[in-house]
Structure formats: structure tokens, C-alpha cells
Image (cartoon, rainbow, N blue to C red):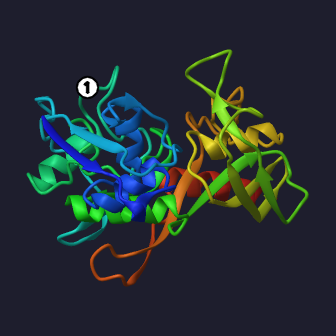
Amino acid sequence: MEKKEYKINEELVNIRLDKAVSMKDNSISRMAVQRLIDEENILVNNKKTKASYKLCLNDIVTIIKEEPKEVEIKPEDIPLDVVYEDNDILVVNKQKGLVVHPGNGNPDGTLVNAVMARCKDSLSGIGGEIRPGIVHRIDKDTSGLLIVAKNDTSHINISEQIKNHEVKKTYIALVRGEVRENEATIDMPIARSTKDRTKMAVSKNGKNAITHIKVLERFKNYTLLEVNIETGRTHQIRVHLSQIGYPIVGDYVYSNGKNPFGVVGQMLHSTSLKFKHPTFNEEMFLKADLPEYFENVLESLRREE
């Protein structure tokens, strides 16, 4: 266990606790700071304090970093569609059905197991022992682009870009129903469902969530959408589209999943990412074509038209 303490000087007076810690220790991302505060591993005057607490002169801030637990995650030879790779990042086009990291019910066979086999020991450790290198996630049945960090510096940089809405994530979704508007913005807060803790729901007490949609193609009873998200709430796109009456085809969680195509799991694909390279600061634009099954469904709809 590593323990650091420092006294607040005039420079940090009236600064939020989470921001001040990031300013003092740039090896910890704001996301990691929030987690440490929630776990009571960042204290002010030896007391648990909220991230929003405004620091006072001579406050004593304590940061406790626990040693990572020994958890054995075995590298597995799972095929990866690598879109881009260098010494700092790896960007993969994740296939539908692949879980991103180990968890309850998924101890192995995940993207993390596959990435470990490819990258060996060169992965960021900030995500914790079961999420090495994982900066952001997409759902098991969502396909498409995902960034993996190969070192802590890259992880912190990409995390900050995501937090500051500087990473543009574009998705393609096929929804049930004919969307009338050519473009629209969905601005509805999202929280954990009070009825089913495995689901998310629109809630006035939730965190803000903003989704932009644009119609790409209309079919009889279906619409193909381009979707951009400003925020990255769990299941955000699926919840928002279901809430406005256009559930994603194949989504059994937020609709009845009915479709004549036999598709199981949401037809949602992360098609492009725009961000700045964490080391060279160059703008990156990466794209991943729709999966074959997705294209086949669209072709069948076009034939019907």
C-alpha cells in the first residue's frame, strides 16, 4: 500500500477535491480519483469527503493506493480485428457477442484475454486487475471500435479526452419504426432502474445523457440511424432509442426483441472514432465497416423496398 499526504496551500484553496488531486498527481486520472474517493482511499483531514468538497487552507489530503490484487487472467488465442496499433494504443473492431472484460458469469473468453495474448505485458494497469488497458467499453452484443491503452500515460490521456467530450464516437443502429425527423437530439438523464438493477432507465434523478440521431435510410417499419453520443452512460443509446419509441432491432433487454431477421442482440455498431493520439497529439480518425450480418439485413430490407 502506498500512502501520500500533502497540505493545501493558497494555490488550491476553494478548488474541488477531485480536481486538486489530479493537479497534484498527474499519474491519476480524474476517473481513477473519483473511484478512490468513493472507496474512501482519498481522505481530507482523515475523513471521508465528497469529490465536490472545496478545499480549505491547511487541509491535509491523504491518498491511499492499494496494491493490485493478484488475479490470474490467462491470455487466450481469440481472433482480433485490429484496426490500428502502435506502442501506445491498440484499436480493435470488436465482434458481436464478445464480452470486453472478465466479470460475473464471464471469467474468460473476453476481449481482455485476447488482448493479453497479443500485447503480453504492455498494457495499462489503471483499469484494475480485470480490466488492463480498457479505457472505455461497449456492450457484449454491440460490435465495433474500442480503444485499448498500452501504458498508463496513454490511458490517462484518452480518459481525459473522453471526460472532456473530445472523443467523437459514431454508431450505426437499425431501429424498429419509421423515424419522422431527419435529425434529432435526445436529452434525458439515465440512472439504474429501480425495478430491475440489471437495467438502466430514463430518470429525473439520473446523470445527464445526450444522444444525437440522424436518419441515413428509411424502410417500411424500420429506420437506419447514425448516432453520436456526447455522454457515455451505460446502455445510453439503447435506453434513449427505446424511450422515444424506436427500439434497436434485436434488443431483448429494452424491447421485446422481435424481428423477422432472426437477429439476437442489438443491431448497434460503433463505426468510427475521432480522437487525438495520446503521445503525438495528432488527430486520429478510424472507421470499421458494418458486420456482414448487418449488411445482409439491410440488403433484404432494400430488396423489399
Judge from the rendering whether residue 152 lies leftward or rightward of residue 38; answer left or right.
left
Q: Nearer the viewer, residue 147 or 245?
A: 147
> Can you give x and y, in whole percent of width and height, for residue 216 in the image?
74, 66
Q: In this view, does 127 lie to the left or right of 188?
A: left
Residue at the image position 46 percent from the left and 49 percent from the top: 55
Q: Mark 1 points at which residue?
A: 107
Q: Which residue is drawn at 42% across and 42% down?
A: 34
Q: Quadrant location of residue 151?
A: bottom left
In which quadrant of the rendered image does the C terminus lie? bottom right
Q: Which amino acid does label 1 sit on?
A: Pro
Which residue: 30% across, 57% down?
148
Front residue of this view, candidates 90 and 224: 90
Residue 178 shown left or right of residue 231 in the figure: right
Seen as rendered, the residue at the extreme right is 180
Q: What element carries label 1?
A: loop
Which residue occupies the foreground of this view, 193 or 239?
193
Q: In this view, does 196 lie above or below 45?
A: above
Residue 248's x, y, as percent?
68, 42
53 relative to 89, above or below: above
Whether residue 267 appears in this view of the structure is yes
Picture layout, residue 231 above or below residue 50: below
- Which residue is painted at 73% across and 54% down in the image? 301
Residue 28, how many percent across, how many down?
Answer: 29, 53
Quadrant of the drawing holding the N terminus: top left
